[in-house]
Structures are given as C-alpha cells and as structure tokens.
Amino acid sequence: MTVWVVCGAARGAGKSWIAGRLLGVLPRAVHVKHGHGEHRPDRDVRLFHDLDQVRAFLAAPPPCEHLVVESNALALEGGGDLVVFVDAPVVPPVRRPDADALKDSAHLVVACDVTEEAWDAPLAARVPDPALRKAVRAILAAQRAHLFAHILRARCKVWLEVDGRHGLGEGLALLLPWVEASGTLAAGAREVGLSYRHAWDLVRQGEAALGFPLVATRAGGRRGGSTTLTPDALRLVALFRKLEQEVEAYAARRLARLLHGEPDG
C-alpha cells in the first residue's frame, strides 16, 4: 500500500482538489481527511479530528492499494510514502507559519519556484507504473497552472566578464553548442539565426576577454575544414548554464518570500 499525504500552505491552496483527483486515478484508493470540518455524506471520505485517530487508522487500514490522506500534521511528522505540498499564491489571505517546514518535508512540491521536472524522480522511486506517474504529474501540473499562471516572476540576465570585458553571454552560450553539433561555425550560426560575420565576432570577442580559445578549426579534407569547441569552451558553457539556472531559481524563491512578507536579513 502507498500512503499519499497532501498538505498545503494556506486555505484555498487546493489540497482537497488534488486529493480528489488522485482518488480518480489511483487504483483501489481510500480517502482520509484530518481536520475540523463536518462530515459530508455526499463524500466518501473518513474524517478524523484528532491526529491519533489518523495514526490508528493507518496502523490497520482497510484493504486498498493507495491511501490518500489530507493532513498537514501528518506531513510535518514525516508520515506517508509520498508527501504532496501545495504552495499558496504569492499573497494568500493567511499563510501558515509552518508552510516552509511543510514544503521541506514534501517529496512533491507544487509551487512557482519548483519545476515540473522536479517531480519525476520522487514519482519514479515510488510509483512503478509509467501511465500512473503521467496521470499524477498532470494533476499536479494543472493545479500549479491554476495557482501560479498569473503571478509576478523574477527574470535574470547572466553574463560573464573579465575586467569589465564581455566574455560569455546568452548569445555565445547559444551559438557554441550548435557549432559543436554541426561541425562548422557557419552551420552553427544558421541554426541560431546569426550571420557568419556576427557569429565570428562573438567568438573573437569572447576569446579576447577570456584569454583562451573557444573553437578549434581543422582545415583540409574533401568536405573542407571543421570547427569544434575546445575543452575549456565546453566546460565554460556547461558552468554558465548551471549558474543561470541557479540564479533564476534563487530569484524566484527570494521573490516569493519577499511577497509573503519575509523580512530582510
């Protein structure tokens, strides 16, 4: 049996919506809710007001393949095989004070600063059926789009300089992998929509600032010469892309915290 625990940062984040959709795709699933509401006869859910009641139920559950539990408290104490956290929009009415702790406890985080690709590894580790993983991911993606489609986003531009001279930016970082893949600077330039002259200027400008060659050209042969990237260029482009991703992820997290009212420092 797989125990799914759904928790959230605030009322209205969509815990019950996600739990209901999971029940629709998970085979032989049972729904449990921990909270202070009233039982609704139109819903097939076991409602418990006390966490000890939830623990007792989990100790001897009915025959099922999946148990979907809505409970912030159970998530905080590390219960469940897959914990799903649903973040709140950037300015919710009331955000739980333990929202960040809930987020840290989760395997699957639905938030503006977490990409959908981040769900793949936790799902693959606990859900062997690829079709079921795809269905779960679609549910999480739908709620993410609903909550965060129209929020503020931080955008960053990264480039590398040496003594104030431009060495590597988005244009050159886009061009160089295509040069490596195509084997010539001319073909790489065509792939990214640059003239050969502009592409060559970018390469020469980068090499002059960085102090080492970015491309190596070999002449001769029936088909003419070829151009490949130097080992230093390959390493630098990989580092640039990693830095770019990390800067954007930090900016998204920081913006969300500032909008939630987190003080500086």
Image: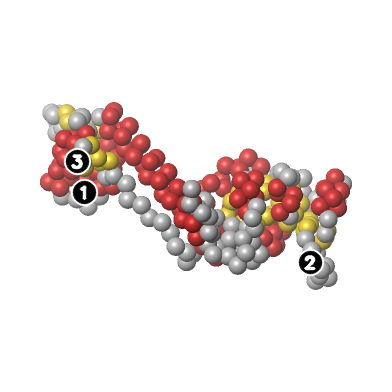
Location of mark 1 (residue): 190
Residue 196 visible in the picture: no
Tag 3–tag 1 contact (CB < 8 Å) = no
Q: Is residue 83 left or right of residue 230?
A: right
Location of mark 3 (residue): 165
Earlier in the chain: of badge 3 and badge 1, it is 3
- Alpha carbon separation for disc pair 3 and 2: 63 Å
Earlier in the chain: of badge 3 and badge 2, it is 2
Earlier in the chain: of badge 1 and badge 2, it is 2
| Element at label 1 | helix
- Alpha carbon separation for disc pair 3 and 1: 26 Å
225 shown above or below 191? above
Q: Going 83% across and 59% down the picture, which residue do you hit?
A: 49
Q: Is residue 102 left or right of residue 141?
A: right
- Check residue 37 in the rendering and tell me which mark sits there, or answer none: 2
Mark 1 burial class by Cα count in 10 Å: few <14, some 14-19, many 20+: some
| Amino acid beneath label 2 | Gly
Q: Residue 256: horizontal and vertical position, in percent?
A: 50, 56
Q: Going 32% across and 50% down the picture, which residue do you hit?
A: 157
| Element at label 3 | strand
Q: Residue 12: horizontal and vertical position, in percent?
A: 64, 66
Front-lying residue, 235 or 21: 235
Tag 1–tag 2 contact (CB < 8 Å) = no
Q: Going 47% across and 64% down the picture, which residue do you hit?
A: 151
| Element at label 2 | loop
31 shown above or below 79? below
Q: Going 14% across and 43% down the picture, which residue do you hit?
A: 201
| Amino acid beneath label 1 | Arg
